[in-house]
Amino acid sequence: METGSEYSVLVVDDEPQVVWMLQFSLEAEGYHTYSARNGKAALQQVHEHHPKLMLLDIMMPVMDGWSVLEELVALPPEERPRIVVVSARASLRDRAKAAELGADAFVAKPFNVDDLIGVLHGLEHAS
């Protein structure tokens, strides 16, 4: 299987430059991307496009990442994307909370794009 070719990724972050950089990098790797700037829009994208993977920021307006995780837990497992929390809130408590709420991985901001893509590749092969 060609890496990324069958995987869609939803990038959820309220910082436009972060969304742009991630989409650019992911599309260069062969992923199909969608984006949302807040949690409410992210949930709409999940229901509309059924992405396989999600990069989720925690601190956002309208609905934060914690609330998104809580909503996604209610979905049947086959409808839930694999989730990588990408956040500046990277304390052990935040990492533990993300895992408890169903996140598959956690990457602290600022991050290295190659490392983040490596995490996504790992989730692809684990699914």
Image (cartoon, rainbow, N blue to C red):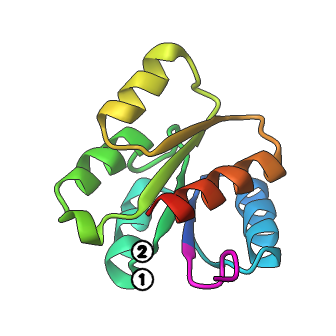
Residue to which mark 2 is pinned: 45
SS for dot 1? helix
**Prevailing secondary structure class for the magenta stretch in the rendered image:** loop
- The answer to the question of whether label 2 and label 1 lie on touching residues, with beta carbons closer than 8 A, is yes
Left or right for 113, reference 107: right
Local packing at callout 1 (Cα closer than 10 Å; few below 14, some 14-19, many 20+) is few
- In the rendered view, tell whether residue 126 sits above or below residue 65: below
Which segment is the magenta one? 1-8
Q: From the image, which quarter does the C terminus lie in?
A: bottom left
Residue to which mark 1 is pinned: 49
Q: From the image, which quarter does the N terminus lie in?
A: bottom right
Which residue lies at the image location 31% right of the left edge and 77% below the top edge? 47
Q: Is residue 62 magenta?
A: no
- In the rendered view, tell whether residue 104 sits above or below residue 74: above
Amino acid tagged 1? His
Mark 2 or 1, closer to the camera:
1
